Structures are given as C-alpha cells and as structure tokens.
Image: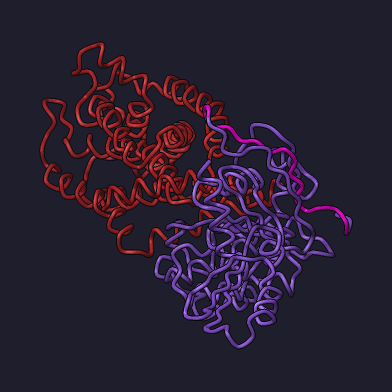
Chain colours: A red, B purple
Amino acid sequence: MKTAVIRIGWRRGLIELRQSFTNGADLFGHFLWPVLMLVVLFFLRDREFGATGFLLGTLALPSILGMNAAMGMVSMSQQLTADREDGTLLRAKATPNGVQGYLIGKVVSVAGGLIADLAILLIPALFIIDGLVAGTLGSWLTLSWVLLLGLVATLPIGAILGSVFPSARAQGLVQLPVLGLIGISGIFYPITALPTWLEWIAQLTPIYWLGLGMRSALLPDAAVGVEIGDSWRHWETVAVLGVWAVLGLLTAPAVLRRMARRESGSTVATRREKALQRVG
Amino acid sequence: MLKVDDAVIEVDGLRMRYGDTDALHDVTFQVWPGEVLAVLGPNGAGKTTTIEILEGFRMRSAGRAEVLGVDPAEGDEQWRARVGVVLQSWRDHGKWRVRELLAHLGSHYAAYSTSEVPRPWDADELLAAVGLTNHAGQKIKTLSGGQRRRLDVAIGLVGRPELLFLDEPTTGFDPAARYEFHELVRRLAAEHRTTILLTTHDLDEASKLADRIMILSAGRIIAVGSADELTRQIAGKDEVRWTLDGRRYCEATTESTAFVRQLFTRYGEGVGELEVRRASLEDTYLSLVRQELVP
C-alpha cells in the first residue's frame, strides 16, 4: 500500500515536472533568472575581488547556486498555497491517499525543478567562469550531499510556510524576510564583512550554509580565506542543516494535516470569491 | 458489505453550530441504496454544511452520522475509496490534460479494487460516458464550463463509488449544459445503481433528478417526499376562477375537480371562462420557504 502511494506520488511529480518544462510561461520562469545571472557573471568574469587574487564571478557563482537551492523553500510554499486556493488540494483530499500522493508529487516536482534550474545555470557558467574546481569527483560529491541535505532542510519549511499563510497574496510577505536573509547570508558579499550580530543571524539560516557548502564544493581550497574561521566548516554545515531538517520533518506533518483537515468545498469557494473580488 | 435494507446514509439529530448561531438544527434523515436524494433549499439553508459533514470534510457539533456504515469524521482511506465527491471546481489542475488527470486520480483507487467493484473505472470508458472523448488530450484550463463540469463528474466517478455527492452541480450552467448534465446523472442512477445525494436551490432540477426531495430551510428539514408527495402533502391549493352573470369569482381549494363538478351541477351553462390552476410544487416550495423566513 505504502509503496503504491509513493509510486503514484512519484508519477504525479514527474507529470508536473514535464508540464512545467513544456509550457511557455513556466519555461520563461525557469530560464529568466539563470540567464540574467549568466549575463551578470559574464561581465564580472574578469574582475578581481579585492586583493584576494580571486575573480568575483568565480566567488559569486557557487553562492548564487546556494541561494537558488534555498529558494526551493519559497517555491514549495507558493505552490502549496496556490494549490490550496485553486482546489487542487481539496481534490487530493477527496481521493484515497490523495494528500500523501499530492505531497510526494510536490516534493518530487519542486526538487526536480530546482535541480534542473541549477543545471541550467551551472553548466553554461562552467564555460564562462574560470578558477572553479568543478571537474573533480570530490567537488561533485560535496555538491550532491550539500544540495540533498539542503533540500531536506528547506522543503519542509517551505511546506509549513505554505500551510500557514492563508492566501497567495499573503505569500508575498514570505518573500520579504527570505530576501532579507539572502541579503545577509554571505551570498553577494563575504559574511565576514558584516557586523557580528548579523553574522550570527545569517548563520542560523539554512541559506548561509547552502551557500557555504556550494562554495566549498566548487572553489579551490585557497578561497577559504574569506570565510568565517578560514574553514569550510562541513561538520557545522551538516549540524545546522540537520537541525533544520529534523525540525521541519517533525513539524511539517502535523501542520500539513491541520491544513488539509480544514479544506472543504466551502473554504475553497470563499477563497475563490475573495480572489474574484480582487480581480473585479 | 452493505445489506440491501441498510441505509447508505443515516443521519440522526445532526447539529452544526458556528459561534453562537446554529446552521443545522436536529437534522434527521436516511438515504437508501440506489436512491437519488435532492437536498433543496435557498442559499444559507445549511445544504452545503450538511453535505460537507457527510463527505467527511467538516466536523459536526452534535448528532450521529453514518455514511456507508462509517462515521464520516473517522472515515479512513478505504472508506474514502467508496465515496465519490464532485467538487465545485475552479481552476485546479489547469495544466493537466483531461485523460492524464483522470487516469492519475484513478490510479489511487487501484489498491481498493474488489472482485465485485473493479476499480478504477477505465479512463477512456469514463470519458466516453461523460462525452469528453474528443477532449481527452486537451489541457483542462481550455475546457468550457460545461465540459469542465463533466470532467468533475468523471473524477467523482473514477473510483466507481457506491455513493456520490454532488454539491450544487449545475450552478452557472446554460440550459443546454444543464440538460446534458441531468441526462448524465439519470443514466448513472439507472445503469449503475449509484446512490446519489445532491444539493440544489433549483426546484426544477430537484424534481427532474431526485427520487425524493428534502427541503431544508434555516437549518431545519421542513418537508421530505417525492415531488408528487410534496405537492399533495403540503398546503398547496388549486385555484379555480370562473364568471357567473358577468361577475368574476375565484376560489382556492384542494379538491378542484370536485369543486368544478359541483359548480356545473349548480349553475350549469351559467358558468363561463373557467380556469383551474393546479397547485405547483414551485408554489408549494416558495410558500414553504416563505413561511420559514417570516416567523
């Protein structure tokens, strides 16, 4: 029974993934940011970063990958809210094992879409940017575990945020703090240049550690000099992302269940009316 | 398995309270296997609350409810597989293709297939049954309102439910779409012996589709019966109008035929411009609902 549900959910995820890569609007979304980032990286490719001897583009690329990976949290949250608003979730609820299948599908499609987006950025970037150590087995291994652990840490948080916020409109509010956290997470600016208290806040978020992990995977060892404690801090990365993962995985099922329990035809109808009023 | 004489839905003393207002007071009724019951009432009468409690989507405040022998508040996935819910769709799964979604949702039911009830219903067969074969490969968001509704019904049926819930199924339909939809529901009830509970505020729809009509007003059942029974049962009076010696007369009576016979016996050819207006269910319904509204 359980394996049947996982199989159905997996299939749902693949169908959604295929849909999102075969329609114009979604494709535009998949390519817009990577292309913009690539353009920026292209112009930065020859600029040196301070006196470190490193190129700015080289330092920036892994950080951007880390940030994009963390954004899976936002898309998870947005998709959940949207699916609640348009009745997708209620339909899942009316189907046996539907909510489980739906959630498995969502994880597969969000994670799959994210990995595809990262590849869209990383593969061309490897041709533009010098000084990465992307060729080695070790770098791919590090990249894989950081990404995997990062997804396990961030997607449940996204699911919780998506369950808590009542409408797609309120979802907009989620983006602001996330953008703020990205700003201080050492992705655009070495974290060691920030005031200590901001440094601490940043280090509580998974975003910082995803960026650090990506840098540790793709930058040569000498680049560790711009990081806190002159170290890639892999153990700390595992610890912080691990704590987020555990917290998220423990909390998300209850929050999701509560949200699903509240769904009914009339709640969807009420939301529909509100949304239509906004349009009209 | 249900016995023949077991009610599919058994509701006893159902109450629903929102804050300090009662949306349902002491609602008691049964639905029998193979029956089509229409819950009729004006907006805000408690129809949707009732159906959502029975669908297992809403917790009741008090009373007993059993659907297919199970309390819907505790219905598990096995129970869920036996119940079909036709939701009022909006724009969910807009990117999916018609057949793709139907087959996917159907796959959820495969684990609940039995030798008596093979599940799910084959997607192509089902599309043919609701007249969507030509749209199987179309994206759902490109369907018209009526087509979309037929897909909703197909989704509600894909698990071959023993019981089907339809909440205001034809709201926003044009007359042609409404007619087609009624045909479909009648076919289901006749060919598949599906038990159906539907809500509507349209009396015409209720009398066309249902074996029995239950009128709900302000959270109370105010009448139950077939369309004919309701007409007879409740105060509906026929109206007889005639002229005699140039004067107009009008009389309301429950026995219009006998009254007219008497009229002729007494006045013979003096009676002119005779007109008998039979009490219609519509008048009955309106007078019932009006009585409830004016305390």
Q: Say which residue appears at 62% left-offset and 67% top-offset.
A: B207
On screen, A218 above or below B104?
A: above
Q: Residue lying furthest top in this view?
A: A196
Task: Please identify the quarter of the rendering in which residue B275 is found.
Answer: bottom right
Count of numbered badges drawn on the protein = 0
Q: Tell me the residue at 42%/47% (across/down).
A: A85
- Tell me, yes or no, if residue A123 can be seen here: yes
* Above or below, A33 relative to B170: above
Rendered location of residue B287, percent (x, y)? 55, 56
Is residue B166 or residue A219 the one in the foreground?
B166
Decide: is A84 above or below B84: above
B124 lies above or below A113: below
Left or right of B124, for residue A128? left
- Tell me the quarter of the image containing the N terminus of chain B: bottom right
Task: Say which residue appears at 59% left-offset and 68% top-offset.
Answer: B280
In the image, residue B6 lies in the stretch drawn in magenta: yes
Please provide percent x and percent y for residue A260. 55, 39
Q: Residue furthest front?
A: B245
Viewer-closest of B266 and A82: B266
Given residues A198 and A175, the one toward you in this image is A175
Q: Would residue A173 be found to the left or right of residue B248 on screen?
A: left
* Foreground pick, B129 / A72: B129
Residue A184 image offset from top left, x and y in percent: 24, 24
Q: What residue span does the magenta drawing correspond to?
A: B4-20
* Residue drawn 61% across the image and 54% down it: A8
Image x and y of residue B164, in percent: 67, 59
Is A278 inside the magenta-drawn segment?
no
Q: Is residue B274 left or right of residue B13?
A: left
Question: Where is residue B174, by image quadrant?
Answer: bottom left
Res. A10 visible in picture: no
